Image (spheres, rainbow, N blue to C red):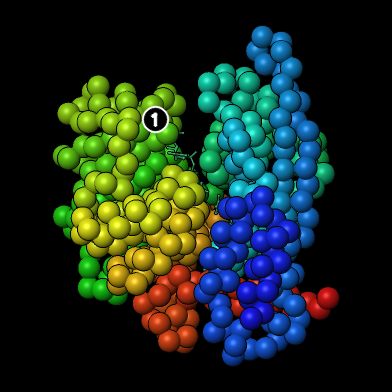
């Protein structure tokens, strides 16, 4: 009743924010048993409070193109929750980015960060700036203008942005360089920096590697492994590349990946080195790959239509609808893992769970990126660097722990295989309990 009422009110208030409503419905759909067993959440009106961001900062970003034209973009930072630590979460630069998407991402981030066990609140931000086709100097000028406007609202103990779609080590470097001048301090107010100047080793790899570590733990609980298994990985950006790299190192074969222009199919197993060259160095389209290898590039194919053992979705939200899930089940998929944030619709995820197919929800499976960001904050605070091996070992432990907590919590609520329910309850309970203990 309580959940239904809050969802209805949210629907009428934010009907124009579909991704945000979808993310809230996904979490609320999992926590009814918890709320039945514990009436403190209703008494403290936690649901109404938890869906409203603590702050939203909107700002103008003005910058100059190479030809002297003036460009204006919108910047947004959604500081969702500081219940468990300073606001923490990525920045997304993408044309058409909406407040709805950034609210959904900030909401998710609060529970994901709770699952890492680190001292991290939840936030997300970004801009409708489209980095595609911009020159290196234009990217730099935009990043400088963006962080100049955001600087008063962030800081190592306040809010620590990082990367997301369209924002990687390069953009973080330009923002950090400018931020340092503005505040006249070398402090870790951004993560995902180059390890040359305060970044953590293994942050670049962390989300993709972490998703595979989570998948490994989940598959082992079913007596399954990676050796000789065929995988598809949607996307070919930061998360997808390091998911593919780790999968291949564990003996799996990645037979397809994708980008905005289409799907690449390489039945012999993709060459991640070549994909890195195309995406990280040349910043081009996957179509280039098929020119140098025996592979097929299809502009009009859906990656969900390619039969495989394991499917990793690492591009963006709502990549897989109910039909996509049905197709994968028909083709015999054995596990589905979310490397991106909310790549499956709620209906698609529920169908997989009902069909008994191991399914790793995003807020658990892709928490490795922000977890290593948390480790980067710790390293910056004491001006000491951990080695790649040390960070990777900690990442593996954190991912194993998130799996165990999600599984144990799912068991506590009577559905041991439902990691979506387990992760949602475990994350929600931490944030909600911290809110209650901190008073009004
Ligand atoms: P990148 O920008 O590095 O890569 C995104 C990839 O997805 C690109 O290959 C891009 O294609 C593709 N893509 C984006 N939008 C679409 C679309 N609408 N249709 C088809 N393909 C698309 O971003 P990340 O790898 O960092 O992020 C990917 C996902 O992972 C996002 O959901 C993000 O929120 C999530 N995530 C990221 C973390 C991180 O540490 N970076 C941490 C946890 C989650 P193209 O190459 O053509 O641009
Ligand atoms: O969605 C995510 O977890 C991220 N983009 C990473 C955020 C971070 O602060 O490292």
**Which of 62 and 216 lies nearest the eye of the viewer?**
62
Q: Is residue 25 above or below residue 240?
A: below
- Left or right for 204, reference 83: left
- Left or right for 157, reference 361: right
Residue at 27% x, 55% y is: 328
Residue 124 image position (x, y, % from top left): 65, 50
Residue at 78% x, 33% y is: 60
Q: Dot 1: within a 10 Å radius of its alpha carbon, few (fewer than 14), some, or many (20 or more) residues? A: few
Instruction: Report the number of numbered marks.
Output: 1
In the rendered image, the quadrant that contains the C terminus is bottom right
Q: Residue furthest top?
A: 67
In the rendered image, the quadrant that contains the N terminus is bottom right
Q: Is mark 1 within 8 Å of ligand 1?
A: yes
Residue 76 image position (x, y, % from top left): 72, 43
Q: Is residue 132 above or below residue 35?
A: above
**Which of 310 and 145 lies nearest the eye of the viewer?**
310
Q: Is residue 401 visible?
A: no
**Element assignment for label 1:** loop
Residue 39 image position (x, y, % from top left): 67, 88
Q: Is residue 112 above or below residue 46?
A: above
Residue at 72% x, 75% y is: 46
Residue named by callout 1: 261
- Left or right for 274, reference 38: left
Residue at 39% x, 35% y is: 259
**Which of 340 and 23 lies nearest the eye of the viewer?**
23
Q: Is residue 32 visible?
A: yes
Q: Quadrant of residue 121?
A: bottom right
Residue 132 image position (x, y, % from top left): 53, 26
């Amino acid at each position: 009743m309580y959940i239904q009422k809050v969802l209805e009110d949210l629907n009428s208030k934010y009907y124009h924010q579909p991704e945000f409503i979808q993310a809230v419905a996904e979490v609320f759909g999992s926590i009814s048993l918890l709320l039945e067993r514990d009436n403190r959440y209703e008494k403290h009106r936690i649901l109404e409070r938890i869906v409203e961001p603590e702050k939203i900062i909107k700002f103008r970003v003005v910058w100059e193109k190479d030809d002297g034209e003036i460009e204006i973009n919108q910047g947004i930072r959604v500081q969702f929750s500081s219940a468990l630590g300073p606001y923490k979460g990525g920045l997304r630069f993408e044309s058409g980015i909406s407040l709805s998407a950034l609210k959904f991402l900030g909401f998710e981030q609060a529970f994901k960060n709770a699952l890492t066990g680190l001292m991290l609140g939840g936030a997300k931000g970004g801009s409708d700036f489209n980095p595609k086709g911009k020159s290196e100097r234009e990217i730099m000028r935009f990043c400088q203008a963006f962080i100049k406007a955001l600087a008063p609202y962030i800081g190592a103990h306040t809010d620590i942005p990082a990367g997301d779609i369209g924002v990687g080590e390069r953009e973080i470097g330009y923002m950090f360089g400018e931020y340092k001048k503005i505040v006249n301090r070398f402090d870790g107010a951004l993560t995902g920096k180059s390890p040359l100047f305060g970044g953590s080793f293994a942050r670049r790899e962390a989300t993709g590697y972490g998703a595979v570590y989570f998948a490994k733990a989940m598959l082992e609980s079913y007596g399954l492994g990676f050796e000789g298994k065929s995988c598809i990985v949607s996307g070919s950006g930061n998360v997808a590349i390091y998911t593919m790299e780790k999968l291949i190192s564990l003996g799996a074969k990645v037979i397809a990946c994708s980008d905005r222009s289409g799907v690449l199919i390489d039945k012999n197993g993709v060459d991640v080195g070549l994909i890195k060259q195309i995406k990280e160095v040349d910043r081009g389209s996957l179509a280039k790959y098929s020119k140098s290898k025996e592979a097929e590039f299809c502009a009009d194919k859906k990656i969900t239509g390619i039969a495989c053992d394991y499917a990793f979705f690492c591009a963006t939200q709502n990549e897989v609808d109910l039909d996509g899930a049905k197709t994968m089940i028909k083709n015999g998929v054995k596990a589905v893992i979310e490397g991106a944030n909310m790549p499956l619709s709620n209906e698609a995820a529920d169908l997989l769970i009902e069909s008994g197919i191991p399914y790793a929800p995003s807020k658990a499976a892709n928490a490795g990126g922000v977890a290593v960001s948390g480790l980067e904050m710790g390293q910056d605070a004491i001006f000491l660097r951990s080695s790649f091996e040390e960070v990777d070992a900690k990442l593996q432990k954190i991912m194993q722990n998130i799996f165990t907590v999600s599984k144990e919590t799912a068991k506590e609520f009577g559905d041991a295989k439902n990691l979506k329910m387990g992760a949602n309850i475990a994350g929600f309970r931490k944030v909600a309990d911290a809110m209650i203990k901190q008073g009004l």
